[in-house]
Amino acid sequence: MNTIMTFLFEKVRKRIPINLGLSRPLKLLVLNMLLGALGCSAQKFDSKSLFDGTTLNGWETVNEENAKYWSVKDSAIVGGDGITNIPVNTYLHTMEKYGDFEFRCLFRITGNHDKGLINSGIQYRSVIEDGKIVGYQADIGKGYWGDIYDEHRRALLNYGDLNTVKHLLDEDGWNSYIIRCQGNLHELYINGVKVNEYLEEDTDIPSKGVIGLQLHKGGNAQVVFKHIVIESL
């Protein structure tokens, strides 16, 4: 079992609430169903790592002056320090573009919600235009989990469905994200549970672009990403 699958198994096993009244066999059945939501990601595919664990080679910020907000620590990409208020939205993105793919990572977001917005997101099929990143975003943060947002273009496209994943979500700890795009179908999974499905009907929207990591302005957020992999479909 790979790192992400092991992580998901432990998280689901520990966080299915006892008050659901499930017997042990039914609880294991639910566990297997949730892990099954990963679909082909549970199979053995050749995945490409987007992060070497020690440097930001292959990544760059949309605006050079915002590079100071991004670093590598403990084999993870870190945005913000959890203390400093972030004055502008900043994005770290891949130099390579991707079309049909399955993206996977572990992430953690922390910060003081009483002092401002604690939010992040994963850009995909995005393009850089006039100093801005334009494209889809898989949202991260309280009140926005699992939403699909169209950054600098059409705003909110589809709300995330948290009916199941709310029982598994650790808002201040590690969680997993899977973004799967094939053709005009977009699917998002958090901790192995499908939280969003969106069908793009506008044929003028680019179907290929960079992967990006967002650190949102307005609070002292710190967001951490690790085990960042992608495979072409």
Image (cartoon, rainbow, N blue to C red):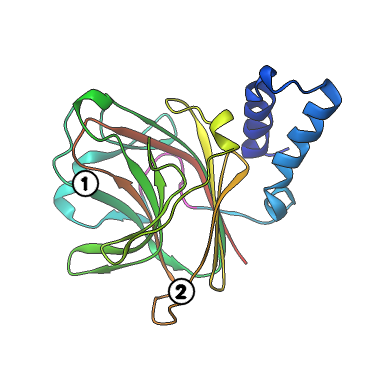
Q: Which residues are magenta?
A: 50-56
Disc 1 marks a residue whose amino acid type is Ala
- Can residue 168 be seen here? The reply is no
Spot occupied by residue 61 in the image (x, y as percentages of width and height):
25, 53
Element under disc 2? loop
Q: Residue at x 60, y 37 (%)?
A: 164
Q: Is residue 7 left or right of residue 174?
A: right
Q: Residue at x 81, y 34 (%)?
A: 29
Label 2: how many Cα within 10 Å (few below 14, some 14–19, many 20+): some
Spot occupied by residue 156 in the image (x, y as percentages of width and height):
35, 57
Q: Residue at x 75, y 41 (%)?
A: 33
Residue designated by label 1: 67
Residue designated by label 2: 207
Element under disc 1? helix
Label 1: how many Cα within 10 Å (few below 14, some 14–19, many 20+): some
Q: Is residue 75 left or right of residue 130?
A: right
Instruction: Determine the CA span between mark 2 and mark 1.
Output: 27 Å
Magenta-drawn stretch contains 39: no
- Can residue 110 be seen here? The reply is yes
In the rendered image, the quadrant that contains the C terminus is: bottom right
The quadrant in which residue 217 appears is top left
